[in-house]
Image: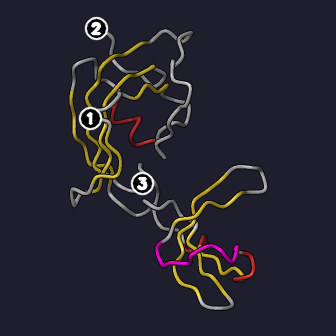
Amino acid sequence: MNQINPNSLVTLFHRLGLTDDSILEDTFGDEPLTIRLGQGEMAEGLELSLVGLKAGDEQTIDIGPDLAFGFVDETLFRALPRSDFDDSLAMEQGLIIEFATDEGDTLPGTILEFDDTEVRIDLNHPLAGQTIRFRVKIIDVDNDPNDSPSQTDPKVLH
């Protein structure tokens, strides 16, 4: 039976949450997720927690910020002019909105506070600084490097 290695194609059910038992994402009772490890589809700590498991294994592990979504970096707090935001956007503290980078990627930003002239944004990952509880049930492990996920819309867990 194949064990998961750092480049395996893995089909699994997963539940991603916080240590207060709040659930952020859950595929149990739905379709399993198929991912290729080592491709940046998951946070480093989530991938590392899978290495060595095999089909049929179940595990729940708490992963600290250092290996999950990082620590809060205060240099990623920004103050932007309110005029940079569409007037139709209903501003709300805690609202997560998507920002485009110069490279064409997107990143989430959380509204910290706002007034008529300025919006303060936190560009850290919304889960930065949090310990993540990650539960998995491994369905299949494929270590053939030529296989690829059959999903047309890959999920990214980071």
Which disc is residue 54 wearing?
A: none
Image side of residue 77 versus residue 125, left or right: right
Identify whether 129 is placed above or below 93: above
Residue 42 belongs to magenta span? no
Residue plotted at (47% across, 62% down)? 126
Residue 92 belongs to magenta span? yes
Classified by dominant secondary structure, the portion drawn in magenta counts as: loop
Identify whether 107 is placed above or below 31: below
Q: Secondary structure at mark 3?
A: loop
Under mark 2, the amino acid is Met
Identify whether 85 is placed above or below 49: below
If you read the primary sequence from the N terminus, does the residue marked by circle 3 or circle 2 appear first?
Answer: 2
Image side of residue 143 versus residue 115, left or right: left
Report x, y in % for residue 15: 29, 42
State the residue position of label 1.
Answer: 28
- The answer to which image quadrant residue 6 occupies is top left
Q: How many marks?
A: 3
